Image: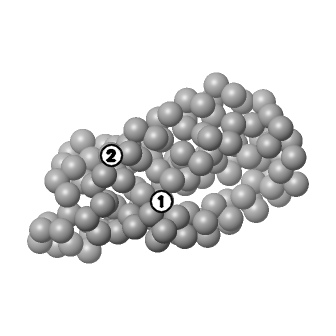
């Protein structure tokens, strides 16, 4: 199902974008739950953090579209479902929640532009 994508697509770009999307969603969830702001790092609450989080919104769907360009729309839908499941597992495994969210936010802010660039420069 994913043979064409694995042979010709850029797997690193997809991994970076899925990671960034899940980290940004988790950071926004933490920011909304922390009304007092005492547990949320300042980078997430700042205006630049908001801009970075908005820039990562397409990371939720673009990897599936990218896979679909290589392997067909069915593979894109299957990949999107798998990315949602594995993304949640990655968030739990990497301990994105809690005190490490600020570090993950900075890494994701660097990762998703790289993922965008790698995927756009390698379109079929």
Asked whether residue 50 appears in the rendered view, the answer is no
Residue 98 occupies which quadrant of the picture?
Answer: bottom left
Q: Is residue 37 above or below residue 114?
A: below
Residue 66 drawn at (x, y percent): 70, 42
Image coordinates of residue 114 in percent, x first then y, are: 50, 33
Element type at marker 2? helix
Q: Which residue does the numbered mark 2 point to in the structure image?
A: 106
Residue at the (20%, 63%) spot, across then down: 40
Vertical placement of 107 versus 19: above or below?
above
Q: How is the image coloured?
A: one colour
Q: Which mark is residue 42?
A: none
Residue 72 placement, left or right of 110? right
Badge 1 density bin: few <14, some 14–19, many ≥20, Cα 10 Å: many
At a point 69% along the width and 37% down the height, the residue shown is 10
Task: Give the left or right position of residue 35, taking residue 90 as reference.
Answer: left
Within 10 angstroms of label 2, few (less than 14), some, or many (20 or more) residues?
Answer: some
Number of the label disc, if any, that sits on residue 22: 1
- Which quadrant of the figure contains the N terminus? bottom right
């Amino acid at each position: 199902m994913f043979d064409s994508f694995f042979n010709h697509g850029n797997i690193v770009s997809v991994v970076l974008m899925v990671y960034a999307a899940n980290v940004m969603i988790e950071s926004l969830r933490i920011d909304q739950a922390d009304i007092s702001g005492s547990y949320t790092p300042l980078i997430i609450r700042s205006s630049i953090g908001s801009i970075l989080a908005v820039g990562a919104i397409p990371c939720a769907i673009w990897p599936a579209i990218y896979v679909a360009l290589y392997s067909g729309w069915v593979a894109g839908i299957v990949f999107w479902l798998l990315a949602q499941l594995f993304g949640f597992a990655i968030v739990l495994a990497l301990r994105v929640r809690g005190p490490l969210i600020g570090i993950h936010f900075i890494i994701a802010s660097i990762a998703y532009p790289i993922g965008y660039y790698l995927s756009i420069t390698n379109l079929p």
